[in-house]
Amino acid sequence: MTDALQSLLDLLSLERIEQDIFRGRSTASIVPRVFGGQVAAQALVAAGRTVPADRPPHSLHAYFLRPGDPGAPIVYTVDRIRDGRSFTTRRVVAVQHGQPIFHLSASFQLPEEGLEHQEPMPPAPDPLELPTAAEMLPRYADRFTGPGVVERLLESRAAIDLRYVDEPPFATAGEARDPRSQVWFRTQGKLDDDGGIPRPLLDICLVTYVSDMTLLDSILLAHGRGGWAVGDVVGASLDHAMWFHRPLRADDWLLYDQESPTAQGGRGLGKGRIFTADGQLAVSVIQEGVVRVPRA
């Protein structure tokens, strides 16, 4: 396990300050606010710590209400909405400086058998044939706005081995492409089965963390925009929904297949499917975000 991955796991290991109240911390982000995937993952950890370990999450629905302050702790309050025979529901509010910054509803299910079908996994190259972030990002340093962007991007993703199948938006800014993108990802190192957060909750929380990294890229591709790194778009997550269909391991390769069906009114919609390397559809994701062109 790399130091960066251990730091991420420490970030997810919340401090319990009351029975259903937890405190988390943040790390420096590539933008001057708390990374949305971090808040979502921490909130899901807080909810999961009030649910029996044999009931993994099967869905979450969340709203990003205010930008988070990376320099202040985040307090997560969990409401035990329902404990049923098969399903358990939790609501989590994340608070900083006395104001809610994030709201999460999550549902957990006792595993059971049922009808089975899924969409097939789309074609994608072997992830080991693709360049790592450390190999790819320096190629585009001259396109980024301001110094140190490459270093900040590498630091923000140091715990995750994330590899683009096609060139990312900042590589082809000015050239409109199909609103589709793919990345392979896994943690930078193997996870312990006996860590502080039980599996499969840990795997699902780590995938939740990664799910906010690239989902809005397909919106940018449709308009030839490169994103914040090249200074031609201002954006932020508004809401986020995920459905967890089948077991996965965050330390094995996962394919994140993403597309954008629409953008309008200063907002854009991203849809994603996460597949295991053997073709199992494990997660569906939908996110809407603010996508604005800066005024001249």
Image: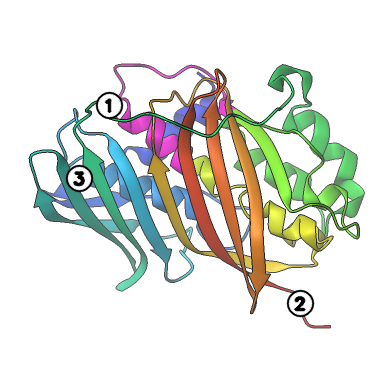
Q: Residue at x 27, y 56 (%)?
A: 76
As drawn, is 102 to the left or to the right of 251? left
As drawn, is 60 to the left or to the right of 16? right
Which range of residues does the magenta coloring cover?
186-208
Q: Residue at x 49, y 25 (%)?
A: 280
As drawn, is 202 to the left or to the right of 135? left
Q: Residue at x 26, y 57 (%)?
A: 92
Query: What is the count of numbered marks?
Result: 3
**Amino acid, disc 2:** Pro
**Amino acid, disc 1:** Pro
Give the numbered dot on residue 294: 2
Q: Position of residue 93 (x, y in %)?
A: 28, 62
Q: Which residue is mark 3?
A: 16
The residue tagged with tag 3: helix, strand or loop? strand
Q: Position of residue 164 (x, y in %)?
A: 73, 35
- For the C terminus, which image quadrant? bottom right
Among the two numbered marks 2 and 1 on one chain, the one whose residue lies closer to the N terminus: 1
Give the numbered dot on residue 198: 1
Q: Looking at the image, is 41 positioned above or below residue 72?
A: above
